[in-house]
Image: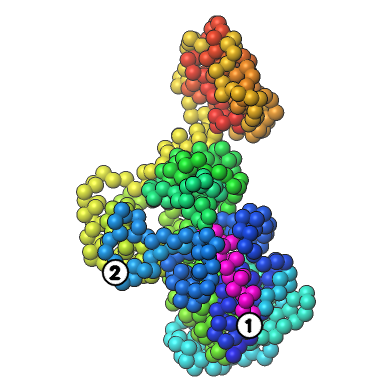
């Protein structure tokens, strides 16, 4: 039996060690973090700072492929996840009545849980496994090496014995020099093993360690996604165990989209995504802006409408890519005795939720074959060949999907309709919409989503194609990706709309507005309450930029009225743009300043007001203005 040295104690590392131990091997896991995940899920999930695992607080799902492997190989881990609060949802339960079962439908089940639930279940099983030792707080800093050889040394024979016949198997003897990795070094010492498994995640430095050990450089295939994600966590109200079944939890418009991720213990995440080049995306870090944006899409509106309790701020993730890092080049593996698993091998953008499933597949492959001379070049070549056949097609699917989404969102952010208007692209977009109404199309889509069948086979089924064609024929005017707000509305929601209306578009005629008002106020009054900001406000032109000022702000309480800012207002051009949201004085006034400037002077408004404003109080009403003055800024107290 083999002794494995596993670099990294995340999902892929713990699963590799546990699966190997269950097959009679032994394993040592080296983890940079100083402790293991525990069963205090909320404490660890929200309070444990893990710089090396930035995705830990982002939504995760376990597809049917991962669930199937857990149930077959690690049933105790699966059971523990359910005990800790994970939920399961069958894809075909979207329909009021589940269609008649077919073989394979049992694998179309998703486990809904935060990453910490899986990590906690794995860590508990590892602690109980006598063949595994985890060394927390002991990172790997180097590799040790023994005598290597030439690429053909046992390569073809070992590859064939492992069932590999194709790319990745060594060529003729003497063609490719290679290094045999025999162990790792840490600040605590040196450790020898039969196989080193790189499970250090997407920020793995093992390629550099391999190069330092004398291995030739291994190329990395990298594809930037151009997508940015903004996530916030919530808990359903007491007495509400499940969220709404409809609408579908993921939707995308022309330039942005929203997804809801139901999870364990009444917790769920709402994610808003946009292109990294979209100038509105920075505003989504503000919780109030984020919620307004999420509510503009059907799933966000449905789930946030339940009165859920926010559990976190807005968590941003950008600069994501899809990365294939096989520790191999066109001549085969760069080392024997070392293979990568999980994100260290194939890091995929989370939109399709494939990462955990691919990591568990790789961990299982290592465990199943670790008895076959794991230190040899042939073992590494066989593993590389398996990865190219089994994992790479799903990686390529992710790359193609992200490229299409990124192109659409970038075009939409620039005001250009793009992406899926005609031909094959329109048919592909229609397949999803058709699936929401047709169980047979939904089954085909679910088999792809849960990694049970590749798309080129599932979607080529004549019956599936005919159903999608009939759906499209019945809707000749159907427009893909039409859900969600229009661009102008989105820019209003995010407080980023610039001077689209000036001069003639602005209502500059004298109106019926009035001055400060004199009534006791019709505000949201009851107590001196909450100041959500006022003062200089948001400024996208020259001048001060203060997102949350220091004036009286928005008082959701008693006092002379409800004021959403009394400072300089929101200037989206280059003028002073002074204006007030609701009122700085008695009465609830919808504007008492010069208005919101979207141009270059105090008198160019945004089509709402350039006069002193309109009071909803009961005071006199002299002076010019408009029946409804501008509420500058994003209209939620970020500016005056």
Question: Who is closer to the viewer here, 179 or 618?
Answer: 618
Is residue 221 visible from the viewing direction of this image? Answer: no
Number of the label disc, if any, that sits on residue 131: 1
Query: From the viewer's perspective, is residue 146 above or below residue 320?
Result: below
Residue 10 drawn at (x, y percent): 61, 68
Q: Is residue 100 visible?
A: yes
Q: Point out the image quarter for the N terminus.
A: bottom right
Segment tinted magenta in the rendering: 113-132
Residue appearing at x 26%, y 44% in the figure:
477
Residue at the spot 34% in from the left edge and 48% down from the top edge: 480
Q: Position of residue 260 (x, y in %)?
A: 47, 50
**Judging from the image, what secondary structure is the residue with disc 1 in?**
loop
Say if the magenta span includes residue 384. Answer: no
Name the residue that disc number 2 marks. 102
- Determine which quarter of the picture holds residue 148: bottom right
Instruction: Report the Cα–Cα distance between label 1 and label 2.
Output: 40 Å
Marks 1,2: beta carbons within 8 A: no
Most common SS among magenta residues:
helix
Q: Residues within 10 Å of mark 2 (few under 14, many from 20)?
A: few
Compared with 526, 137 (above or below) is: below
Dividing the image into 4 quarters, which one contains the C terminus? top right
- Image height of 625 relative to 423, above or below: above
Sequence-wise, the earlier of marks 1 and 2 is: 2
* Residue for point 73% across, 69% down: 137
């Amino acid at each position: 039996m083999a002794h494995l040295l596993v670099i990294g104690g995340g999902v892929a590392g713990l699963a590799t060690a546990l699966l190997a131990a269950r097959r009679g091997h032994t394993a040592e896991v080296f983890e940079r973090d100083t402790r293991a995940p525990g069963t205090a899920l909320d404490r660890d999930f929200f309070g444990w700072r893990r710089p090396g695992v930035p995705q830990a607080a982002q939504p995760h799902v376990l597809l049917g492929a991962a669930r199937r492997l857990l149930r077959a190989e690690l049933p105790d881990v699966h059971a523990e996840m359910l005990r800790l609060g994970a939920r399961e949802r069958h894809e075909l339960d979207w329909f009021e009545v589940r269609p008649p079962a077919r073989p394979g439908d049992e694998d179309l089940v998703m486990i809904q849980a935060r990453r910490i639930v899986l990590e906690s279940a794995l860590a508990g099983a590892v602690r109980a496994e006598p063949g595994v030792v985890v060394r927390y707080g002991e990172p790997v800093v180097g590799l040790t090496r023994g005598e290597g050889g030439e690429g053909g040394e046992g390569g073809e024979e070992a590859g064939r014995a492992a069932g590999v016949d194709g790319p990745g198997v060594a060529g003729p003897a003497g063609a490719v020099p290679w290094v045999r990795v025999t162990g790792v070094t840490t600040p605590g010492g040196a450790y020898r093993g039969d196989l080193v498994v790189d499970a250090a995640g997407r920020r793995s430095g093992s390629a550099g360690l391999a190069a330092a050990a004398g291995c030739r450089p291994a190329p990395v295939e990298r594809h930037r996604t151009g997508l940015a994600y903004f996530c916030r966590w919530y808990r359903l109200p007491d007495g509400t165990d499940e969220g709404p079944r409809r609408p579908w939890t993921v939707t995308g418009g022309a330039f942005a989209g929203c997804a809801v991720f139901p999870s364990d213990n009444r917790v769920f995440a709402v994610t808003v995504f946009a292109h990294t080049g979209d100038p509105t995306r920075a505003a989504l870090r503000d919780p109030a802006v984020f919620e307004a944006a999420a509510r503009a899409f059907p799933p966000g509106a449905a789930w946030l409408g339940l009165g859920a309790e926010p559990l976190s701020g807005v968590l941003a993730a950008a600069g994501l890519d899809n990365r294939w890092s096989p520790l191999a080049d066109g001549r085969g593996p760069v080392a024997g005795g070392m293979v990568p698993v999980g994100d260290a091998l194939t890091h995929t953008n989370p939109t399709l939720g494939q990462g955990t499933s691919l990591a568990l597949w790789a961990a299982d492959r290592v465990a199943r074959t670790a008895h076959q001379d794991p230190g040899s070049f042939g073992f590494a070549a066989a593993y590389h060949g398996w990865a190219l056949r089994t994992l790479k097609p799903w990686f390529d699917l992710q790359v193609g999907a992200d490229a299409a989404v990124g192109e659409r969102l970038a075009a939409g952010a620039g005001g250009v309709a793009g992406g899926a208007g005609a031909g094959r692209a329109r048919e592909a977009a229609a397949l999803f919409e058709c699936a929401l109404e047709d169980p047979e199309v939904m089954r085909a889509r679910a088999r792809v989503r849960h990694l049970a069948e590749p798309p080129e086979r599932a979607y080529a089924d004549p019956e599936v194609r005919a159903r999608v064609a009939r759906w499209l024929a019945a809707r000749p005017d159907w427009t893909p990706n039409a859900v969600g707000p229009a661009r102008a509305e989105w820019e209003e929601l995010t407080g980023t709309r610039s001077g689209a209306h000036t001069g003639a578009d602005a209502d500059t005629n004298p109106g019926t507005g009035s001055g400060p008002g004199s009534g006791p106020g019709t505000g949201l009054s009851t107590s001196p309450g909450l100041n959500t900001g006022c003062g200089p406000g948001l400024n996208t032109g020259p001048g001060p930029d203060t997102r949350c000022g220091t004036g009286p702000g928005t008082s959701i309480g008693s006092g002379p009225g409800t004021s959403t800012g009394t400072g300089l207002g929101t200037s989206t051009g280059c003028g002073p743009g002074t204006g007030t949201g609701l009122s700085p004085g008695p009465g609830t006034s919808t504007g008492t300043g010069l208005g919101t400037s979207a141009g270059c002077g105090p008198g160019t408004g945004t089509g709402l007001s350039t006069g002193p404003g309109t009071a909803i109080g009961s005071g006199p009403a002299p002076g010019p203005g408009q029946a409804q003055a501008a509420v500058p800024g994003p209209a939620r107290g970020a500016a005056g």
